[in-house]
Image (cartoon, helix red, strand yellow):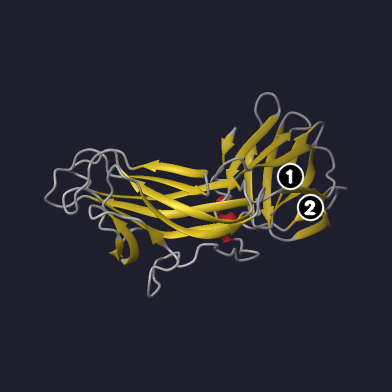
Amino acid sequence: MKTLLLPLTILALVPLAVAQTNLVKNADFEGKTAIPWTWTSTSTHVARIEGFDVTGKAKSKAFACTPYTTRLPLKQNVITVANQHYRFRMDVASLWPALASRQGDAGRFRVLLGSQVLLTYSFGAVTSSKPLLRAHLQAAFKAISSGKQPLTIEIYRIYGGLYGRTPRCYVDNVVLEMDPRPNATKYGTGCGPLFSASMLNSSLPYTLMQTVSAPAKPSIGIMVMGTKRLSLTLPGTTCKLFTNLIILTPYAFDSSGLWSSKIPLPSKFKGPVNVQHVIFTKVKTWKILTTDAYAIQ
């Protein structure tokens, strides 16, 4: 099975169908106050909102603390619906003070919705050559409870902490949104070759899985991707093209006459994108065949 990168070009350029609503308020900590965020800290944590470049793009306000073995819970209440799919993401960073010995645990995070654990992450050990660490964390999940419940970001490390001597951890750009997971829906009837498509939605990134069966040997395939549905009969055939042509990706079948691939979708993909395959095959003479089409959205 092949992982195709070229089709990501079209998938990344497809406009968003509907802007998703972030259920987290003051998600970038740019408000006049921290509300509705709350946290319970100690004098060791020195927890507060301060300026820092968490993403590596620009300095902005972010939540900061000096973690140690006692977990600092940064939280706010959100409203969710049981059995609804959601997507969570945030940016985090860890910076070791210039004069401190840079060894050991650079910081850890655990995110919960109520009692449901969404993700855990550890920066691991830090080295003197790389005192600044950054990460973009994300998770896809199905909520187990309905109603108002706390979204909690726990920040900690397995060793003691001391402001100015151990790592300072940062959180920014916290997003929790409903996840309308993409589906592959068949449309149009091809003229011979078998084509199946499905979405692998169990984890991020969501992935388009495809399998095409060659009608005969030799055969050459072309994956066609577009954004507009058509029903255009190809000249000299009874076969139809069901999408406009934006990206064409040629491929070869394996020795058993099969071709399969997986295409990871961009995190903000909404579609629709249409996928169909055109097969050049030779029995006595070369001819053109087309498959059914699928809409990914």
In the structure shown, which secondary structural element does the residue marked by tag 1 occupy? strand
Image coordinates of residue 27 in percent, x first then y, are 45, 64
Neighbourhood count class around disc 2 (C-alpha, 10 Å): few under 14, some 14–19, many 20 upward: many
Answer above or below: position of 129 versus 54.
Answer: above
State which quadrant residue 14 falls in.
bottom right
Q: Mark 2 sits on what residue?
A: 241
Image coordinates of residue 163 in percent, x first then y, are 19, 53
Answer above or below: position of 176 versus 143.
Answer: below
Q: Mark 1 sits on what residue?
A: 278
Image coordinates of residue 250 in percent, x first then y, are 63, 43
Question: Given the image, on which type of amino acid does mark 1 rest?
Answer: Val
Question: Given the image, on which type of amino acid does mark 2 rest?
Answer: Leu
Q: Is 115 in front, or is 52?
A: 115
Is 24 placed left or right of 213 in the picture? left
Is 129 placed left or right of 202 in the picture? left
Residue extending furthest top?
A: 256
Q: Is 155 in front, or is 271?
A: 155
Is 262 placed left or right of 57 in the picture? right
**Residue at (14%, 43%) from the top-left corner?**
101
Quarter in which the C terminus is drawn: bottom right
Image coordinates of residue 131 in percent, x first then y, are 22, 48
Q: CA distance from mark 1 to mark 2?
A: 8 Å
